[in-house]
Image (spheres, rainbow, N blue to C red):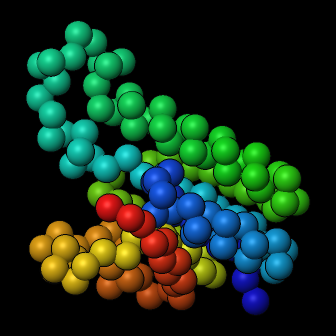
Amino acid sequence: MYDRILLSTDGTVASEEAETHSLDLAAAHDAVLHVLYVIDEDVVTAYSGDEYVDEAEGPEHGLEEHGEETLSELRSRASDAGVDVETAMQHGRPAETIVGHADDHDADLLVLGTKRRPDEYRALLGSVTDRVLRLTTRPATVVKTEVDE
């Protein structure tokens, strides 16, 4: 049923359950798991950089480092589970980048994580997951994570 599953992860607690779910799905369907980590360009460009001595100290470097750690951990978990995995890190606006990546790789299913938050929070700020669901024409599974805040 699924040959190519796309997991979008930001390596946070909101993605933990989605990561596990996507690995289980890929193993059950003998599918290739595509894992995408998006570096949000809005976060990178929001900082002037004046407080950093060199670009290796800026937010982009930190996000790239976190992305590499997240992707490396998922490659290891996929290997342990016997799942073929392809990883990618891209810069851009998260929702649009995720949908574009899914289209480029003809993903059969998108797996996205989200934290359960009050309706008031979502009404004010929204979420990347909500936006992806509005933009994509592909099937998607949303895995909610309960978080104490």
Of residue 126 and residue 45, the one placed in the foreground of this image is 126
- Residue 43 lies left or right of residue 72; in this view the side is left
Q: Nearer the viewer, residue 100 or 128?
A: 128
Q: Residue at x 58, y 68 (%)?
A: 17
Q: Quadrant of the C terminus?
A: bottom left
Quarter holding the N terminus is bottom right
Question: In x, y percent, where is residue 13?
Answer: 48, 58
The image position of residue 46, as x and y in percent, is 15, 41
Instruction: Give residue 85's position: percent from left, percent from top.
Output: 73, 57
**Number of numbered discs visible in the structure rendering:** 0
User: Horizontal placement of 125 versus 112: left or right?
Assistant: left
- Residue at image location 60% in from the left, 58% down from the top: 35
14 to 24, vertically: above or below: above
Which residue appears farthest toward the top when viewing the image? 53
Q: Residue at x 37, y 76 (%)?
A: 116
Residue displayed at 48% across by 32% down: 65
Q: Is residue 59 visible?
A: yes
The image shows residue 137 at horizontal and vertical percentages of 44, 88
Side of 58 where 104 appears, left or right: right
Residue 98 or residue 82, whichever sits in front = 82
Residue 132 visible in the shown view: no
Does residue 126 appear to the left or right of 50 in the view shown?
Answer: right
Identify the image quadrant of residue 81.
bottom right
Tell me which corner region of the image, top left, top right, bottom left or bottom right, holds residue 72: top right
Quarter occupied by residue 6: bottom right
